[in-house]
C-alpha cells in the first residue's frame, strides 16, 4: 500500500530497542513537526477549503500523539531529550520543486508529507511487531494505523487539487529519491527516520 521502494533494514528495531529513550524523544519531536507542518499547509493555502477542512483535525491528532509519547516517556521515568537534526527530512526537502509553478511546489509539499507519514507507518509497524515490550508494541500499532491514514489523506489532497496521473508520476519520482536516501543514511537506532 505505501509503495516504499526500500524497506527498513530489520536490524533497525534491535538498535531502536537498545535506545528506547532516544527513539521516544525523536518520535515526540517528529509528532511536533508533523503538527507544525499541518499548520503550515493551512497557513500557506487558506483558500483551499478542502485542504483546510481535512488537515485541521490532523493538527489535533499529531499534538495528541506528541502528548502520548510524553506519557510513554513518563511511564518509563524518562524525560524528553533534545531535538536532533532530522537528516532524512532535510534530504527530502532538497528534492522538492523550487521555483516553477506554484501548483508543482504545492503538490511536492503534500507528497513529501505523505512520504514521511508512509515511512513512519512502516517503522511503527516494525516496532509494533518486533519490540519485546508488549505495551510499546500496542502503542506503536495504534500509531501505525494513524500514520497510514495521514499518508492516505495527503495523497488524497494532492489528487484533489491536481490530475491523478500527474500526482502518480511525481509520487514515483519521490519514492525513487527516498530509496536512494535510505541507502545512504546510516542505520541508527536513536531516530524514527
Image (cartoon, rainbow, N blue to C red):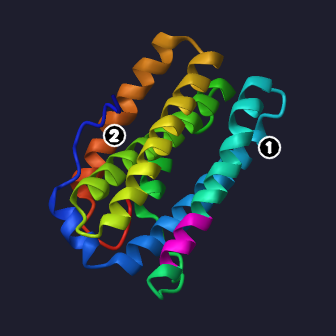
Q: Which residue is mark 2?
A: 177
Q: Is residue 34 above or below residue 150?
A: below
Secondary element at image label 2 = helix
Residue 30 placement, left or right of 49: left
Range of residues picked out in magenta:
67-73
> Can the viewer see residue 61?
yes
Q: Is residue 91 above or below residue 117?
A: below
Toward the viewer: 127 or 155?
A: 127
Of labels 2 and 1, earlier in sequence is 1
Could you tell me which residue is drawn at 77 percent across and 34 percent down? 45
Toward the viewer: 125 or 34?
A: 125
Residue 99 placement, left or right of 118: right
Q: Is residue 70 magenta?
A: yes
Toward the viewer: 121 or 3?
A: 121
Q: Which part of the image, by quadrant, shows the C terminus? A: bottom left
> Can the viewer see residue 94?
no
Numbered label attached to residue 43: 1
Q: What predominant SS class does the magenta segment belong to?
A: helix
Amino acid at each position: 500500500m505505501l509503495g516504499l521502494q526500500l524497506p527498513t533494514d530489520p536490524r533497525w528495531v534491535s538498535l531502536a530497542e537498545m535506545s528506547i529513550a532516544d527513539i521516544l524523544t525523536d518520535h515526540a519531536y517528529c509528532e511536533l513537526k508533523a503538527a507544525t507542518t499541518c499548520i503550515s499547509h493551512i497557513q500557506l493555502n487558506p483558500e483551499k477549503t478542502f485542504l483546510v477542512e481535512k488537515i485541521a483535525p490532523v493538527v489535533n491528532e499529531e499534538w495528541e500523539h506528541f502528548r502520548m509519547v510524553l506519557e510513554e516517556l513518563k511511564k518509563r521515568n524518562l524525560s524528553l531529550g533534545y531535538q536532533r537534526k532530522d537528516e532524512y527530512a532535510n534530504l527530502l526537502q532538497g528534492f522538492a520543486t523550487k521555483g516553477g509553478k506554484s501548483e508543482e511546489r504545492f503538490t511536492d509539499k503534500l507528497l513529501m508529507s505523505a512520504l514521511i507519514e508512509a515511512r513512519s507507518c512502516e517503522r511503527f509497524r516494525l516496532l509494533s511487531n518486533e519490540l519485546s515490550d508488549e505495551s510499546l508494541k500496542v502503542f506503536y500499532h495504534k500509531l501505525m494505523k494513524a500514520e497510514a491514514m495521514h499518508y492516505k489523506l495527503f495523497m488524497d489532497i494532492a489528487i484533489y487539487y491536481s490530475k491523478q496521473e500527474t500526482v502518480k508520476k511525481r509520487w514515483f519520482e519521490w519514492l525513487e529519491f527516498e530509496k536512494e536516501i535510505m541507502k545512504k543514511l546510516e542505520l541508527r537506532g536513536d531516530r524514527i527516520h
